[in-house]
Image: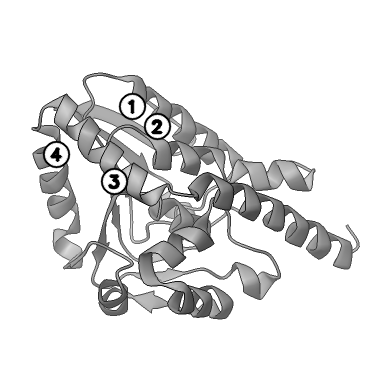
Amino acid sequence: MSGHGIVGIHEGGVAHLTIDRAEQKNTLGPDQFAALLDLVRAADANDDVRVVLLTAAGKHFSTGADTRAKWPVAEAAIVEEGHAERQALMQCSKPVVVAAQGAIIGAGAELALTADIILMGEGAFFSFPEMRMNTLTLAGTIGRLVSLVGRFAAAEIVASGRKVGADEAMRIGLVSRAVADENLADAAHELATVLASKPSALSADFKALLRDADMANAIERLDAERAASARAFSAMMAAMGG
């Protein structure tokens, strides 16, 4: 299955989803979010799938939202575009593995943080630049960052929008493992294959335990962030005369 630069292949219990827009640095617009949502839901409903692997073609995992895409006009609709597929990944009943290389920025970083396991190329970096543009992250990202790296580190990373390289990401617990860039794809495939080899009931229980530990108050955080993002976007548009 494929559509709008998102490719999905099911093989050996692995649903391998690839952002395949290398020429656009894997930017993400409404069409890509919708295609991802369809593929994630299909993988979640497929009893033959035991793990979801999300990767990206080219040099970068994703440089963020596609500013050239046709987005909804209403502020609430724009914010909602950023939540559905990421919420589907967070609530997926199968373990989700992300392998991220190069730039992991904005919407791309938010997408990566929905994973249960993140493998990061040693030359890669995260950045959450939204506050520099007078808006906020989406999809429960701030709450997710706080749970991963702690309140003070999360606050500084989001407020500054600076780059977080692989060494720091490993040190503060933002990712599972840093891998040499040339070995990233193989390492991700190997891990996904190991997870796919487990009985489906075991994989489901493994994911449920991870999700239950991580999702405490997550829905409340998600709703609060959705509302705050809508307010920030509305204020930004008003300041621009939109």
Among the two numbered marks 3 and 2 on one chain, the one whose residue lies closer to the N terminus: 2
Residue 208, located in which quarter of the rendered image?
Answer: top left
Query: In the depicted view, which residue is nearer to us: 86 or 155?
Result: 155
Image quarter for residue 70?
Answer: top right
User: Where is residue 50 shown, x and y percent of the image?
Assistant: 21, 30
Residue 172 image position (x, y, % from top left) = 31, 75
Q: Is residue 218 visible?
A: yes
* Type of amino acid at the residue the image marks with label 4: Leu
Going from the N terminus, do you reach mark 1 or mark 4 first?
1
The residue identified by callout 1 is: 43
Whether residues under marks 1 and 2 lie with C-beta atoms below 8 angstroms apart, the answer is yes
Report the side of 116 relative to 133 (left or right): left
* Disc sitting over residue 210 in the figure: 3
Amino acid type at image mark 3: Leu
In the rendered image, which residue does mark 4 sit on? 195
Q: Tell me the CA gap for discs 3 and 1.
A: 18 Å
Q: Amino acid at mark 2?
A: Val
Residue 183 in the image: x percent, y percent? 13, 60
Q: Determine the residue positioned at 37% across, 57% down.
A: 61
Looking at the rendered structure, the kind of residue marked 1 is: Ala
Viewer-nearest residue: 73 or 235: 235
Estimate the spatial distance between the alpha carbons at disc 1 and disc 2, rounded to whole Å: 5 Å
Q: Closer to the observer: label 4 or label 2?
A: 4
